Each structure stands twice: as structure tokens, then as C-alpha cells.
Image (spheres, grey):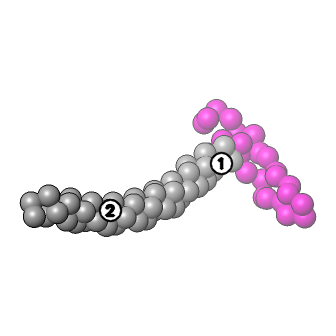
Amino acid sequence: MLANNESLVIGFWNWTTPPLSVSFILFLAFFLGCALGVVLSIFYIFRLTLKNQSLQRKLKRRDAELQKLRVNSLRGLSS
């Protein structure tokens, strides 16, 4: 990476960069890719956490309902 001192100009539509070394451009692309991956992972984990909490609440309601049905059925057998 340090041995590559050539300058490179990148043009994208009507925008161009000043002359930058190829190694700096590669490092910048790697860094931006890592940063984007971390940000997307954080949003994905947040979404999964919300879904998990929702499913936990639903499971507690179902467990309470099941326990209530068990108690009611046992009361009916003992009468």
C-alpha cells in the first residue's frame, strides 16, 4: 500500500476529486465499507430486538391464558 504513490482522479457525473494517491482511495473505500456495514448491522439488530420484545410479550400473554385454562379445567374436575 505504501509503495503505490500514483495519483488518481475519480470522476462521478459532474463531480471530480482532486488528485489522490491510489492507496488513500483504497483505504477510504475500505473504511467507508466498514462504517456502512456497522451502521446497517446496528439497524438490523435494533429491528430484531424490537421483534423479539414483541414476541416475548405475546408469549407471556399466551402462557397466562394457558395457565388460566389449566386452572379452570382442574376446578371443573374437582367439583
- Mark 1 or mark 2, whichever is nearer to me: 2
Give the residues drawn in magenta, as a range. 1-23
Residue 34 rendering spot, x and y as whole percentages: 55, 49
Dot 1 alpha-carbon crowd within 10 angstroms: few under 14, some 14 to 19, many 20 or more = few
| Identity of the residue drawn at 79% across and 59% down | 17
For this orientation, the residue located farthest to the right is: 14
Residue 11 rendering spot, x and y as whole percentages: 86, 55
| Identity of the residue drawn at 39% across and 60% down | 55
Residue 32 rendering spot, x and y as whole percentages: 61, 53
**Sequence-first disc among 1 and 2:** 1
Looking at the rendering, in which quadrant would you find the N terminus?
A: top right
Residue 29 is tagged as 1
| Residue bearing mark 2 | 62
Is residue 23 visible to the viewer in this orientation of the structure? Answer: yes
Q: Amino acid at mark 2?
A: Arg
| Identity of the residue drawn at 75% across and 40% down | 6
Give the CA separation, mark 1 to mark 2. Answer: 49 Å
Q: The residue tagged with tag 2: helix, strand or loop?
A: helix
Residue 20 is tagged as none
